[in-house]
Amino acid sequence: MWAKLGYTAFLCVLVPYYLLTYGPTNFFYFCDVALLMTLAALWLDKPLLAGMAAVGILLPQALWIVDFLVALCGGHITGMTDYMFDDSIPLFARGLSLFHGWLPILLLRILYRCGYDRRAFLAWTALAWVLMLVSYFLLPPPPAPKDNPNLPVNVDYVFGPSNDQPQTWMPPGLYFALFMIGYPVVLCLPTHLLLRKVFPPREDTGQVLTELVAPSPRAIASESP
């Protein structure tokens, strides 16, 4: 229960702040969807939801962690965490963004205790494609308007890797099509294969994630001499 309550308390702070600062479209980012999905996984006892969040963000967030630690030591890799050292951004907002670093660890902890649902890869891929279609056809491309610099643009990078301008290497539609294929194949599929190998299989049967805090009576009995 401590994990559920602590996580819920964090989101009770983050969600209103993000809504007021960035607007509701900010929650179409993969990482924010995974953040909310993990909350549902904890309260609904759904390993599938935890597996979907893990397969979707573990590799990108691992890169975030490495980039942040290197930048903290004065180095530079991708620049994806440069905003964490931008004094023009409130310290409170940057503190909330630290969830990019600890959420993958929490997800791995859940999978360690509860197993990995093998359906997570296909389920997340389907959800990610829906999010990409919404981001490409309904949300704005970069750059952000000067009168609303906090407006999320290029959500999920459907217009290119930069939030300053759309990519110009190829026609936008071709880039988007390649991105829809490349994201699950390059980032999600390797994660799925690794999670399948490391964690035992588990499907949603209910009352599973409670083991995150305490083992079941059956597990205690099996460990008794």
Image (cartoon, helix red, strand yellow):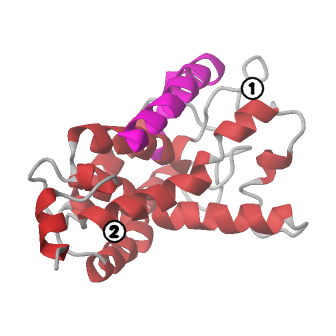
Q: Quadrant of the N terminus?
A: top left
Q: Residues within 10 Å of mark 2 (few under 14, many from 20)?
A: some
Q: Amino acid at mark 1?
A: Pro
Left or right of 112, for residue 169: right
25 is within the stretch colored magenta: yes
Left or right of 52, for residue 97: right
Q: For mark 2, what is the residue?
A: 112
Q: For mark 1, what is the residue?
A: 149
Residue 102 x/y as whole percent: 56, 54
In this rendering, the answer to whether 94 lies above or below 216 is: above
Question: Which residue lies at the image location 66% right of the left edge and 21% below the top edge?
Answer: 21
Q: In the rendered picture of this protein, how many numbered marks are placed on residues?
A: 2
> Gap between marks 2 and 1, in whole Å?
40 Å
Left or right of 164, for residue 211: left
Question: Which residue lies at the image location 54% right of the left edge and 41% below the top edge?
Answer: 155
In this rendering, the answer to whether 19 lies above or below 195 is: above
The picture quadrant where one finds residue 180 is bottom left
100 is within the stretch colored magenta: no
In this rendering, the answer to whether 218 lies above or below 131 is: below
Question: Which residue lies at the image location 65% right of the left edge and 63% below the top edge?
Answer: 65
Give the number of the disc on residue 97.
Answer: none
The picture quadrant where one finds residue 169 is bottom right
Residue 23 x/y as whole percent: 56, 21
Q: Which residues are magenta?
A: 1-30
Instruction: Name the residue nearer the viewer: 197 or 22.
Output: 197
**What is the residue that sits farthest to the front in this orientation?**
225
Question: Which residue lies at the image location 49% right of the left edge and 59% below the top edge?
Answer: 104
